């Protein structure tokens, strides 16, 4: 059994109208979820308990249920990463990470094909494993007084390196077939 907490203002989002979101998470993760106040109990097999916990934690942070449920997709290897930042340290940095009218986060999401959510206690990232790791590094650059352009350049470079690596892999596999 896994235990986690849900932010009080996100309980309704987790449960959904007539319990539909909770039911959907339970179906996708093959678990049973019990919500008592802000306490969430998850029972099932260990892998699915962990998966359901990640979905609940993502919703608690502020992700929409639709984005959090992407973590259950079997055809794509989505992962969830949380960067914990103490409120004392984080509050002055929020603007740098979010940008004017969310411009920095929108650019990071567009380049990386990840979803990013800034919550009260830190930052959550949902996406492909390698992309999530790159986004985490780019956000840490911003937190450590980096400029958005530097973070964007880093993400672009990493994306290009991965595409080049994949292209070489495809070419090599075609060469072996001949």
Image (spheres, rainbow, N blue to C red):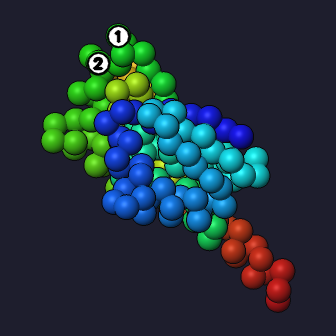
Q: Pick whichever, 42 or 117, lies toward us.
A: 42
Residue at 27% across, 16% down: 92
* Mark 1 crowd level (few <14, some 14–19, many ≥20, 10 Å Cα): few
Q: What is the x, y in percent for residue 138?
A: 44, 36
Screen quadrant of the N terminus: top right
* Mark 2 crowd level (few <14, some 14–19, many ≥20, 10 Å Cα): few
**Would you place residue 153 above or below residue 92 in this image?**
below
Screen quadrant of the C terminus: bottom right
- Residue 91's disc is 2
> Residue pushed farthest left?
101
Q: What is the x, y in percent for residue 159?
A: 50, 54
Q: Pick whichever, 8 or 146, lies toward us.
A: 8
| Horizontal relation, residue 9 to residue 49: left or right | left
**Would you place residue 18 above or below residue 53 in this image?**
below
Determine whether label 2 and label 1 are within 8 Å by CB. Answer: yes
Residue at 63% across, 59% down: 29
Q: Pick whichever, 21 or 77, lies toward us.
A: 21
Q: What is the x, y in percent for residue 177?
A: 82, 86
Q: Is residue 113 visible?
A: no
| Horizontal relation, residue 159 to residue 27: left or right | left
> Residue pushed farthest top?
88
- Residue 69's disc is none
Helix, strand or loop at mark 1: helix
> Residue pushed farthest bottom?
178
Residue 122 quadrant: top left
**Would you place residue 9 above or below residue 23 in this image?**
above
Helix, strand or loop at mark 2: helix
Q: Is residue 36 visible?
A: yes
Residue at 31% across, 36% down: 9
- Residue 88's disc is 1
| Horizontal relation, residue 117 to residue 33: left or right | left
């Amino acid at each position: 059994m896994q235990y986690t907490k849900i932010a009080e203002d996100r309980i309704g989002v987790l449960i959904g109208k007539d319990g539909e979101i909770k039911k959907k998470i339970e179906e996708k993760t093959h678990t049973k979820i019990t919500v008592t106040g802000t306490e969430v109990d998850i029972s099932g097999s260990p892998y699915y308990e962990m998966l359901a916990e990640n979905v609940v934690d993502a919703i608690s942070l502020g992700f929409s249920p639709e984005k959090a449920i992407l973590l259950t997709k079997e055809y794509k290897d989505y992962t969830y990463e949380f960067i914990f930042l103490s409120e004392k340290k984080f509050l002055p940095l929020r603007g740098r990470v979010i940008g004017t009218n969310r411009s920095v986060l929108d650019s990071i999401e567009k380049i990386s094909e990840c979803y990013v959510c800034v919550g009260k206690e830190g930052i959550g990232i949902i996406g492909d494993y390698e992309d999530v790791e790159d986004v985490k590094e780019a956000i840490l650059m911003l937190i450590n007084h980096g400029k958005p352009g530097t973070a964007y350049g880093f993400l672009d470079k990493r994306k290009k390196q991965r595409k080049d690596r994949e292209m070489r892999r495809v070419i090599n596999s075609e060469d072996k077939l001949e």
